[in-house]
Amino acid sequence: MDACPNCQSDTFIKAGIIKNRQRYKCKSCGYFFTTGKLGKRIDDYYVNKALQLYLEGLTYREIERILGVSHVSIMNWVRKYNIKRPYNTAYHPTYRILNHSELRDYFQKTSNIKGAGVLVTELGDKFMLIKWERFRE
């Protein structure tokens, strides 16, 4: 234990034991905390990627299927970082997961990139291609 998780101060005192874990109180901010938090920490890469995909218009469930991270975690991140998605009904995103050669072949056809915005983002050893198309009337 080297710092308070709330204010990063290194001045804290022991404040009892709860569920067989030592509890501490920070002298600087008064925050109570315990050691060895249970549960796993998700890599920041997945948090950033999930928030990017959310901003691109994908739903929580779609992001869950792509990244393998719970849709509830994604909702919590969106709420935590106060992410607001711009709302525009004239366009809708479609996405595809492609490997390197498929991506190269995709961009060689001009019909694939004409008349729509395209974004490519790295997704592990593959690439995600997001394309915005106007709704047809």
Image (cartoon, rainbow, N blue to C red):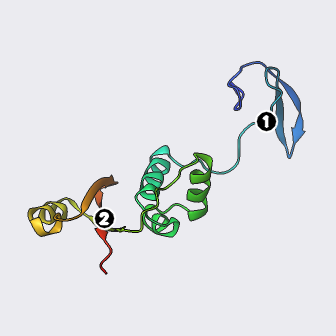
Q: Looking at the picture, how far across and down is residue 18, in whole percent?
A: 87, 42
**Can you see residue 16?**
yes
Name the outermost residue toward the front.
137
Q: Are marks 1 and 2 in contact (CB under 8 Å)?
A: no
Judging by the rendered image, the residue that carries numbered circle 1 is: 33
User: Considering the numbered disc 1 on the image, is that residue within a helix, a strand or a loop?
Assistant: strand
**In this picture, residue 60 sits left or right of residue 37:** left
Q: Looking at the picture, how far across and down is residue 41, in whole percent?
A: 59, 47
Q: Amino acid at mark 2?
A: Trp
Looking at the rendering, in which quadrant would you find the C terminus?
A: bottom left
Residue at screen point 46% across, 61% down: 87
Question: Image height check: is 97 above or below 7?
Answer: below
Q: Amino acid at mark 1?
A: Phe
**How busy is the neighbourhood of tag 2: few (under 14 within 10 Å), some, or many (20 plus)?**
some
Marks 1 and 2, how far apart at CA: 46 Å
Q: Name the foreground residue: 87 vs 35.
A: 87
Judging by the rendered image, the residue that carries numbered circle 2 is: 132
